[in-house]
Image (tube, rainbow, N blue to C red):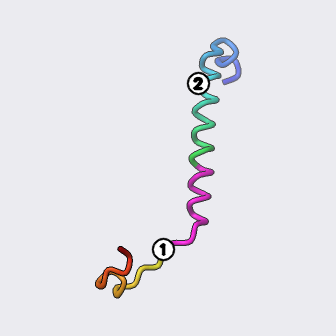
Amino acid sequence: MRTLLANRPELAERLARIVKECVDAADAARAASRQPALSVKIVDVCFGYLS
């Protein structure tokens, strides 16, 4: 892998971008999973308390 990237620097830049996108997506998913979920009761839905 190092030899390939040494011979083709444009691939190194592309690989770095792809890895960064994956890490950013994983961070976003991790942050979203820590958010409390909205609790909805059937009464809220039937009587429109959420609107």
Which SS class for mark 2?
helix
Q: Looking at the image, is mark 1 or mark 2 earlier in the sequence?
A: 2
> Which mark is on residue 17?
none
The residue at the far bottom in this view is 43
- Vertical placement of 27 versus 16: above or below? below
Range covered by the magenta-colored residues = 26-37
* Residue 40 lies in the magenta stretch: no
Instruction: Answer above or below: position of 11 versus 28.
Output: above
Q: Main secondary structure of the magenta part?
A: helix
Foreground: 13 or 47?
47
Q: Which residue is mark 2?
A: 14
Q: Residue at x 47, y 79 (%)?
A: 39
Residue at x 61%, y 28% (from the top left corner): 15
Quarter residue 8 falls in: top right
Left or right position of 22 against 42: right
Where, by quadrant of the figure, is residue 33 drawn?
Answer: bottom right
Q: Quadrant of residue 1?
A: top right
From this viewpoint, which residue is outermost toward the left?
A: 46
Q: Amino acid at mark 1?
A: Leu
Question: For this view, does 43 lie left or right of residue 28?
Answer: left
List x then y, in percent, for residue 16: 64, 29
Q: Which residue is mark 1?
A: 38
Task: State left or right for residue 35 relative to residue 41.
Answer: right
Quadrant that contains the C terminus: bottom left
